[in-house]
Image (spheres, coloured by chain):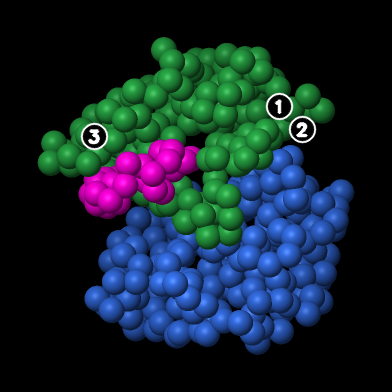
Chain colours: A blue, B green
């Protein structure tokens, strides 16, 4: 397997953590795509992923998988039990629901704020600005954070007492939010405790 | 099982078709939520789904599932083989990728255009306008349509020769696009043939 990505960026972080949690990180060859330099918009990369986003997973038979949640879905069914996306219909439904809410209402909302309402990756990369929509999405991210803090009142992780894909999406979202200048309000004590649990996981070694 | 929705709206359409394709439509009690009258924002419904969206699936044990793709994930694993979301890791990865691309780049893009750049559901419901972003998202929807037409050049359905959740998301997207005034360009012959195949399916009876 080969992954095209940019280490440290939000969506690559989600997939690298999924690989580590599944014990698959050593089976992958990483190909660095220099996104801040615009390499993701050059013909060579567009031939791999026309939507220009990283990460992309290329299977040994040449199949291309993009979209982080889809890559995680693949990896989770590759070996052993699907530990990240649920074992039965109800678990799968709940985990997919929470993953989508955290993705749309938090991680993607932070991304919209960063790209549309701040200088983002600089004028060569950010061809579109829309401060009004970007600020609106920052509000959404903060509202979602409040809901996330509430979700963590009853369990160690977002979908119960074990880690799932929801936690990986959330972790990447908080890293991106910090980078984009959206601080986590200090009153969200459940989120603070969850961050400590996440940072203590052995899988975090693959990010450093 | 109970579903809170508004018959004919895009996301309810996705889930009603999934129910019909899985042979589960008769097992569900439907509860009408009058979205154009703002019923989805009243306290009674917000207690069911704080994000105010339809459809919502309520299981017999009281579990609430929102997000159409997550509801379909649940339904697909409820009985028999998962026919809509793939049978193995690779199928699951490809189907989740395509479903997400059609959702984000087409169905959600049409929704953003409709709600932000047209009168949408009227001034009582549409509290936020952003014509610039809405028009940008219409462009995205049209670009995604071109890619979808290309995808259908080699197979009867988006993820191969059998119907999957990707086709249900796309079908709801085309219905919404037509309603919002985004016509399918006539040169997209593969899409036109696919629409005929979709309209001929027995599952369509649940929409009338």
Residue B121 x %, y %: 39, 23
* Residue B156 falls within the magenta-colored stretch: yes
Residue under pointer 2: B63
Q: Are marks 3 and 2 on the same chain?
A: yes
Question: Badge 1, how many Cα within 10 Å: few under 14, some, many 20+?
Answer: some
Which disc number belongs to residue B58? Answer: 1
B126, above or below B139, in the image: above
Q: Is residue A99 left or right of residue B35?
A: right
Give the spatial CA distance, label 2 vs label 1.
6 Å
Q: Is residue A88 left or right of residue B193?
A: right
Q: Secondary structure at mark 3?
A: helix
Residue A21 x %, y %: 72, 72
Residue under pointer 3: B193
Q: Is residue B40 left or right of residue A60?
A: right
- The first of marks 2 and 1 along the sequence is 1
Can you tell which quarter of the image residue A20 is in? bottom right
Q: Please give the name of the residue rendered at 45% of the width and 84% of the height, measured from the top-left corner.
A: A31
Q: Are marks 2 and 1 on the same chain?
A: yes
Can you tell which quarter of the image residue A25 is in? bottom right
Give the spatial CA distance, label 3 vs label 2.
39 Å
**Chain at numbered mark 1:** B
Q: Please give the name of the residue rendered at 53% of the width and 68% of the height, measured from the top-left corner.
A: A11
The quarter of the picture where the C terminus of chain B appears is top left
Task: Say if residue B107 shows up in the picture.
Answer: no
Q: Are marks 1 and 3 on the same chain?
A: yes
């Amino acid at each position: 397997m080969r992954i095209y990505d940019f280490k440290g960026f939000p969506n690559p972080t989600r997939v690298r953590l999924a690989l580590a949690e599944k014990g698959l990180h050593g089976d992958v060859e990483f190909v660095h795509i220099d996104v801040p330099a615009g390499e993701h918009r050059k013909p060579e990369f567009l031939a791999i992923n026309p939507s220009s986003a990283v990460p992309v997973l290329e299977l040994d038979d040449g199949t291309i998988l993009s979209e982080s949640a889809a890559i995680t879905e693949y990896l989770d069914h590759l070996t052993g039990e699907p530990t990240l996306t649920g074992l039965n219909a109800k678990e799968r439904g709940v985990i997919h629901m929470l993953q989508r809410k955290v993705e749309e209402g938090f991680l993607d909302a932070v991304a919209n704020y960063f790209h549309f309402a701040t200088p983002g990756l600089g004028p060569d990369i950010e061809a579109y600005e829309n401060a009004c929509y970007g600020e609106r999405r920052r509000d959404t991210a903060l509202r979602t954070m409040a809901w996330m803090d509430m979700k963590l009142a009853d369990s160690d992780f977002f979908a119960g007492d074990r880690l799932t894909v929801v936690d990986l999406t959330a972790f990447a979202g908080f890293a991106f939010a910090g980078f984009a200048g959206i601080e986590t309000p200090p009153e969200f004590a459940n989120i603070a405790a969850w961050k400590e649990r996440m940072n203590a996981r052995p899988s975090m070694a693959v990010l450093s």
